[in-house]
Image (cartoon, grey):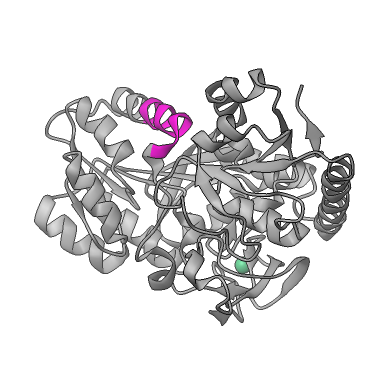
Amino acid sequence: MTRTDACLNCAGTERELVLDLGSTPLANAFVRPEHETWPEPTWPLELLVCRTCGLVQLSESVPPEILFADYVYMTGASATMVAHFDEHASTHVHDLRLGPTDLVMEIASNDGTLLSAFARRGVRTLGIEPATNLVVAAKERGVDSVARFFGAQCARELRDEYGPAALICGNNVLAHVPDLAGVLEGCRIAVEPVGVVSIEVPYLVHLLERLEYDTIYHEHLSYFSVRALADAFGRQGLAIFDVQEHPVHGGSLRLLARPGREHAACVAERIASERARGLEDLATYHAFAQAVARNRDELRALLEGLRAKGRRIAAYGAPAKGNTLLNYCGIGTDLVEYTVDRNSLKVGTLTPGMHLPVKDVRVLAEDVPDHALILPWNIAPEIMKQEEDYTRKGGRFLLPIPTPRILT
Ligand SMILES: [Zn+2]
């Protein structure tokens, strides 16, 4: 891990520290039980705002080779994400009139969930994914994928081999990359002269307004506003022609761009609306930091109060963001006995830092702890539907943000 000394986008050095979440392990560094007593490396989790371009970013940069060589998040594990990607493919195929000769590429194509939705609609696809275990999973479902890190050089080579892409998608990947310029340049090269770049990122406005501070972890280097994205795209000769909002991952932005110079008028309107919401004022970020500290106090008070009444508490899910929440709030097995997850790669491990045992999802309805704290709050409705058995037996779910509460 290295401390960055300049903005990841504009290289400006005037960056303001606005939030300190303490020093934590990597959010996806789940611990094998036999390694429980081994020391865990931790790094500062600090949020900075660039005074020049407005990009919100971490102070530390994790080499992507460490983060993504063997990644445990599988898109196909969440029905909400599968449905979202199906809509995504359907919309693009319709709007861009994609046909059997067109090529759709995806950066960080994960287990091939999105591309298989394109393939079902008769479009050629190619995935680019650094995690070799995910490339294997994608190929098993028939999605052609290469195990590589994406950038300008990679884009040139793939273009030589496969031809230009009609569309290149990058969903929830831009926040992870230290080399923003290289990835956006690669996108432009892959689609030149007339293809479309579709980028989806969690939206900073929702992070701030819905207090989604647990989405801050080392794997997420950047937290995007339209203002910062417009700056980053413009630097690489990409002109944004549409900006949309989608409800996934707590509120995402989807930007569509083409090789070109001028952003469409909607971009300036979005930037003006962000300014009106205070995104360019440091006071907004300081107020956010105060609300985060208040959330920790309230969540601990809720859990401690329930424990004092003799209630048993578990958690639901072992998402990366859950580990920011658990570590920052200091929630260990004294408050929450264990968590459960559907991802078999995580079952049997301990959560990084707080060491909650991760059990099979079926344990919840069998054991029926009095309460279950939902860590992947972005898919809470899906979870509550799947776990009706648990609630029927008297279990009650808790939500941590924006205000900790018992769901009735
Ligand atoms: Zn900057």
Q: Report whether 367 appears left or right of 97.
A: right
Do we see residue 246 in this rendering?
Answer: no
Quadrant including the C terminus: top right
Task: Name the spot of residue 98 as percent of width and height, x first.
Answer: 23, 29
Do we see residue 167 in this rendering?
Answer: yes
Q: Quadrant of residue 171?
A: top left
Examine the rendered structure and indicate whether residue 189 appears above or below residue 266. Answer: below
Residue at image coords 60%, 74%: 60
Q: Nearer the viewer, residue 301 or 37?
A: 37
Task: Name the spot of residue 36 as percent of width and height, x first.
Answer: 55, 70
Task: Name the spot of residue 389 as percent of width and height, x first.
Answer: 58, 21
Examine the rendered structure and indicate whether residue 130 appears above or below residue 363. Answer: below
Q: Report whether 218 appears left or right of 170.
A: right
Task: Name the spot of residue 290 as percent of width and height, x first.
Answer: 87, 56
- Magenta residues: mostly which secondary structure? helix
Q: Nearer the viewer, residue 220 or 320?
A: 320
Residue 298 painted magenta: no
Q: Quadrant of residue 274?
A: top right
Residue 82 painted magenta: yes
Q: Report whether 140 appears left or right of 188.
A: left
Q: Nearer the viewer, residue 85 or 34?
A: 34
Q: Report whether 277 appears left or right of 138.
A: right
Examine the rendered structure and indicate whether residue 80 appears above or below residue 146. Answer: above
Residue at image coords 34%, 49%: 110
Count of numbered circles on the image: 0
Examine the rendered structure and indicate whether residue 68 appears above or below residue 122. Answer: below
Ligand 1 shows up in the quarter that is bottom right
Residue at image coords 88%, 52%: 297
State which region is magenta. Answer: 77-88
Residue at image coords 27%, 43%: 194
